Amino acid sequence: MPEVKRVVQPVEVNYVCDKCGHGMMQKTSEMDAKTGEIEHKCVICDHVQIFKWVSYPRVEYIAESGDS
Ligand SMILES: [Zn+2]
């Protein structure tokens, strides 16, 4: 396979608190290697939520517009 390159753009992915609807969820612990669970806490109301295999905030890369 030849090497291929394309232009991508970083986007920040955040999760807005389910409880207060205003705060962003922030990772408060490392991922549990067995279950994939990662504890997060709302920066405003301290609501705790567990996400599996994903953490917030995180950066993802998307193709620049026109490419997809
Ligand atoms: Zn909240």
Image (cartoon, rainbow, N blue to C red):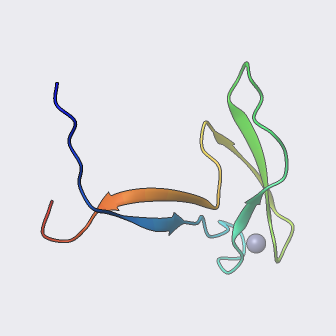
- Dividing the picture into quadrants, the one containing residue 53 is top right
- x and y, in percent, of residue 43 in the image: 81, 72
Q: How many marks?
A: 0
Query: Which sits in the foreground, 3 or 31?
Result: 3
Q: Residue furthest bottom?
A: 22
- Residue at 65% in and 77% down: 21
The residue depicted at 62 percent of the width and 70 percent of the height is 16
Q: Is residue 65 above or below residue 50?
A: below
User: In the image, ligand 1 is in what quadrant?
Assistant: bottom right
Outermost residue on the front side: it is 2
In-image side of 19 versus 1 (left or right):
right
The percent position of residue 44, horizontal first and vertical second, equals 82, 77
Q: Is residue 44 above or below residue 13?
A: below
> Residue 19: percent from the left, percent from the top?
71, 68
Q: Report the side of 16 relative to 68 (left or right).
A: right
Residue at the image point whose x is 69% and y is 71% from the top: 24
Quarter occupied by the C terminus: bottom left
Name the image quarter holding residue 9.
bottom left
Residue drawn at 87 percent across, 67 percent down = 46
Pick whichever, 19 or 42, lies toward us. Answer: 42
Q: Nearer the viewer, residue 55 or 18?
A: 55
Q: Which of the image's four quarters has the N terminus?
A: top left
